[in-house]
Amino acid sequence: MIEIYTDGAASGNPGPGGYGVILRSGNHYKELSAGFRMTTNNRMELLATIVGLTALKTPGQEVTIFSDSKYVIDSVEKKWVFGWLKTGFKGKKNKDLWLMFLNVHKLHNVKFVWVKGHNNHPENERCDELAVAASKNKTAQTIDTVFESENRNRNPQNNDTFSVGS
C-alpha cells in the first residue's frame, strides 16, 4: 500500500504557487515540491496529485491519496472529470493537467481520502509547508507555461513580455 499526501498553494490565486507531496510506503518516505511564478491553487492541488502518482515506478499499485482539495477529490470520485473528457473539457479549466492526471491515474488503483486542511494533520501540514516554501522560492520557480499562455490570451494587458513604447 502506498500513501500519497498532497497540497497546493498559491499566493494571490493567481500568483506565485507551489505544491508539496509526501510519498510513504512501509519504511520508504520521500518529499517532493516545486514552485511556479504564476499559477492557481487548484492547478497546484491537481499537479501535486499528478506528481505523486508519476513518482511511482511500478504500474498497478494500490494507492491512497490524502488531500484537502475538494476540487480534485470530487472531480474524480464523483466522476465529473470523465464527463469533461467526453465533452473535450468544454468550459472547464486545467484541461492540460486533467489529461495528464487521467493518463497516470489509469496506471494504478487509486482511492482518495479527504483531510481537512490546516487541522493539525501532520502530513497535510508538512505538504502545506513544502508548497508554501516552494511558492516563495523565487530562484527555483519555474513557469506554468499553459496557465501563463492562457492567462495572457485572455488578458493581453497583463502580458509581462510586452510593454507599450518598447
Image: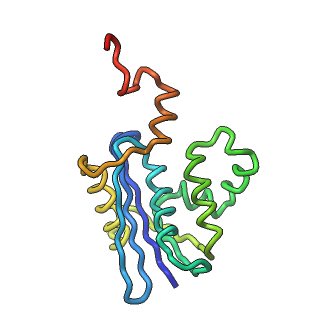
Question: Which residue is drawn at the image coordinates 67% and 60% (left, top)?
Answer: 78
166 lies left or right of 1: left
Camera-side residue: 139 or 131? 139
Q: Judge whether 162 appears above or below 28 on screen.
A: above
Question: Which residue is drawn at the image coordinates 41% and 61% (left, top)?
Answer: 7
Instruction: From the top left corner, tell me how far across and down residue 69 is, in percent.
Output: 49, 58
Of the 4 image quadrants, the one containing the C terminus is top left
Looking at the picture, the colour scheme in use is rainbow
Q: Judge whether 46 appears above or below 53 on screen.
A: above
Instruction: From the top left corner, tell me how far across and down residue 161 is, in percent.
Output: 36, 27
Instruction: From the top left corner, tell me how far across and down residue 2 is, in percent.
Output: 49, 81
Question: Which residue is drawn at the image coordinates 31% and 68% (left, top)?
Answer: 126
Of all residues shown, which one is farthest toward the right? 86
Of all residues shown, which one is farthest toward the bottom? 27
Camera-side residue: 160 or 76? 160
Quadrant location of residue 31?
A: bottom left
Instruction: From the top left corner, tell me how far across and down residue 135 is, in percent.
Output: 31, 51
Camera-side residue: 99 or 119? 99
Camera-side residue: 58 or 45? 58
Of all residues shown, which one is farthest toward the front? 166
Total numbered circles: 0
Of all residues shown, which one is farthest toward the top? 165
Question: Which residue is drawn at the image coordinates 48% and 40% (left, top)?
Answer: 147
Quadrant location of residue 105?
A: bottom right
